[in-house]
Image: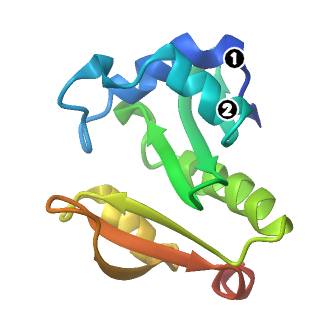
Amino acid sequence: MNFREATIEDIAQIHVVRNGVNENKLSDPERITYNDYVEFLTIRGKGWVCEMDNRIVGFAVVDVQEDNIWALFILPAFEGKGIGRKLQELMLTWYFSGNKDCVWLGTCPDTRAAAFYRKSGWQETGRNGEKELKFEMTRAAWRKGR
């Protein structure tokens, strides 16, 4: 496994991962455009990928403008191998190294993702709209849990 910062050249493969998940699927696969990825990777935040045999199998992106985890997705065949944990570590370590104290994310209830975030120390803080749970991670909780 190779973990590294995401680049614009990775967008096509990142989009394949985003649309290849079993949970938190997009109702319209074209809802996220190439330009959205460019904006989140170069202006709004930063991203990381995990590669195996020159194929991206997981990625994570944090949005520093909205203090939000925009994405953390792994292809189903690669779940349970520690990829999400490592991507989260890279992302949150970078995020909290700046002048940030809290980050949030939304995910569907009763999913592996929700269980992953709870196990990782995220605190459920309510709802993000009708269909998502909202979780928060503080800098202090992140440092304490590492």
Which quadrant: the C terminus? Answer: bottom right
At mark 1, the secondary structure is helix
Give how far apart the Cα atoms at labels 1 and 2 are: 7 Å
Amino acid type assigned to the residue bearing label 2 in the image: Leu
User: Do the numbered discs 1 and 2 sit on residues whose CB atoms are within 8 Å?
Assistant: yes
Q: Is residue 49 visible?
A: no
Residue 8 is marked as: 1
Image position of 17 (left or right of 145): left
Amino acid type assigned to the residue bearing label 1 in the image: Ile
**Residue 73 coordinates in the image, percent (x, y):** 45, 40
Which quadrant: the N terminus? Answer: top right
Residue 42 is marked as: none
Query: Disc 1 or 2, which lies upstream in sequence?
Result: 1
**Residue 13 coordinates in the image, percent (x, y):** 53, 15
Residue placed under numbered mark 2 in the picture: 41
**Pointer 1: residues within 10 angstroms few (<14), some, or many (20+)?**
some
Instruction: State whether residue 41 is above or below residue 73.
Output: above
Instruction: State whether residue 97 is above or below residue 84.
Output: below
**Residue 70 coordinates in the image, percent (x, y):** 50, 47
The residue sitting at 85% across, 66% down in the picture is: 97
Q: Nearer the viewer, residue 109 or 115?
A: 109
**Pointer 2: residues within 10 angstroms few (<14), some, or many (20+)?**
many
The residue sitting at 38% across, 31% down in the picture is: 77
What colouring method underlies this structural image? rainbow
Image position of 69 (left or right of 4): left
Q: Nearer the viewer, residue 93 or 58?
A: 93
The residue sitting at 61% across, 35% down in the picture is: 40
